[in-house]
Image (cartoon, rainbow, N blue to C red):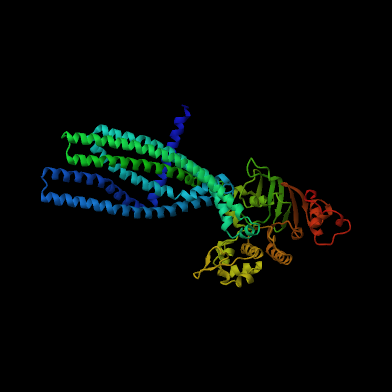
Amino acid sequence: MSPAAPAGRRRRAARALRSARAAFGLAVRAAPGATAADVVSTVLLGLTPVLTAWLTKLVIDRLTTGGLSAREVVTLGVGLTLLGSTAAALPHLRRYLEAERTRAVSRLVRQRLYAAVQRFVGLARLEDPAFQDRLQVAQQTGHIGPGQLAGNTLAALQSLIGMTGFLGVLVAMSPPTAVLVLLAAVPTLVIQLRLNRRRVAMMVNLEHFQRRDMFFAQLLVGIPAAKEVRLFGLGRYFGDRMLAELRGMHAQEHRLDRREMRAQATLGLLGAVAAGTGIIYTVGIARSGSATAGDVALFLAAVPGVQSALAGIVGQLGTMHQALLMFAHYQAVVEAEPDLPRPAAPAPTPALRSRIELRDVWFRYSPEHPWVLRGVDLDLPYGSTVALVGLNGAGKSTLVKLLCRFYDPERGSIRWEGTDLRDLDPAALRERIGVVFQDFMAYDLTAAENIGVGDLGSAGDRDRLRAAARAAGADEVLDRLPRGYDTLLTRVFHDGDDGCAGVVLSGGQWQRVALARAFLRANRDLLILDEPSSGLDAEAEHDLHRRLRDLRTGATSLLISHRLNAVREADLIVVLDEGRVVERGNHAELLARGGRYARLFALQSRGYRDPGPEESKGPLLSLSDI
């Protein structure tokens, strides 16, 4: 055996013990009263079968010897009645207490899980598929672990109390039988733990399949994909893909279920042999006069009692082991290190009065990925509008993520008023930034809430929400909705108590709602507009850019757009190509230079005028020529 093997087992045991303490501690903190009452109920339930068997032995012995008095009849009868009532009532009480604890634990665990996720400053963990798998397991099973561990620990305690009592009977009457019954439980424990380890590993391995299964299922029944699924006839295709994921999951589950079935059959046979041996021995000594009829009855209750308690303890230990392994994923998320460093004493985030500087910025999403930004140098002067243009994949959206500090540059620095963003409090930095993302969110909330999320401090100020919507050109549309600004902007949920569905906005209307969020944050120092007019018709685009000019007045802004007519008024236009700045200047300077910007502008403007004799002879400029 490798010297590292014992050390590895000790580390796993230490982790398991730490997880057990954390999980049980969560259960106690979430529901201290219910847990304490459950402990008392557990002890009583553990003692009840042993006391019942002992009183039954006394009754049988008194009856067979003829020495049972009326007083003893009443005493033993009352005792058996009380024990029977306790055995009947306490399981219901325990189920109630367990349900109370489960609900309380679920609230506490989810609160801590989502608080932990919100502590991640950036996006790196959330965009990591492996971490997403772990996060999904934590979401689905994190709340189960503490409640399950507490419940099974108490159930194991109940079984242990009953087993100890019955085992005492077996040891007193037949020590060899007691040893045989105990030995029969050893392989049960070992096999159960191995099976649990495999089941947990399978569950984690299947998480990716389950997410894919849910993805295809949502495509089949969800609203966003419904039009294309029906128009392109994709139902059968996605349905087959979903079934393929299910078959993959079920095949793994089937293999493990067969192993469990064979193991349980073997263990059942071992238990039956042990019980049969004990019964034969007891009946034999009773025939020789060495045991009374009550002893036989007690022994016949003790053997299955010990076996049942042992099986219960083994099963509960197995379930606890499985719960701990699953709970470990919750702990890994809750205890995960920050994805971005946060300074212990962050520098103040001053109002922007000079510039934002990017100096030799290099970035890639992981060492396995190519560089997205390669030595970018860029200034965003105070009060100016800088436009960023380039083909898809040039690094424009990544640069926005860096400015918002969702990621840190791998090399170089980004400075706000001379201070590196890494030395600032990310929350304070983001309070000074307003953004309209290209992939903005359409929340399944009311119209007012969809605007209010742009600045929660103003979410309750209906006048400010209306003013922002009016500035974005959305007020008239939202005012005409069935419930006005209180209309639910989705058909996923019911709108109000009358069961009516909400309203779905068009793409252009949603874009104006997203822009209203930016107007709600119009007093921020930096305004980032990432493709704000994509998907709009020419008239709507013209109107939107007129409104954006008002929004940008006096603000430092970064405008990203593929439509060069939208950026021609910018103070500075920067052309990105494969992560590098290849051109910079204003519109007139770049056209005069005749470089990439000029060629791209000519390509776009050509679509708005009749082709000349030379242009009509051949194909348009290809993207590789830009």
Q: Nearer the viewer, residue 584 or 483?
A: 483
- Give the answer, above or below, for where 272 lies relative to 540: above
Question: What percent of the width, then of the height, locates residue 202?
Answer: 49, 42
* Residue 133 seen anywhere in this rendered image of the structure: no
Residue extending furthest toward the right: 613
194 with respect to 539 (left or right): left
Q: Nearer the viewer, residue 363 or 287?
A: 287
Q: Who's the residue at 15% across and 35% down the image?
A: 289
Question: What percent of the width, then of the height, locates residue 296?
Answer: 20, 39
* Residue 153 seen anywhere in this rendered image of the structure: yes
Q: Nearer the viewer, residue 234 or 187?
A: 234
Number of marks in the image? 0
- Give the answer, above or below, for where 41 lies relative to 311: below
Q: Nearer the viewer, residue 398 or 103?
A: 103
Q: Who's the residue at 31% across and 45% down the image?
A: 158
- Give the answer, above or below, for where 449 lies relative to 591: below
Q: Who's the residue at 49% across and 69% down the image?
A: 497
Question: What percent of the width, then of the height, locates residue 362?
Answer: 68, 44
90 with respect to 150 (left or right): left
- Give the answer, above or below, for where 184 lies relative to 581: above
Question: What percent of the width, then of the height, locates residue 383?
Answer: 70, 59
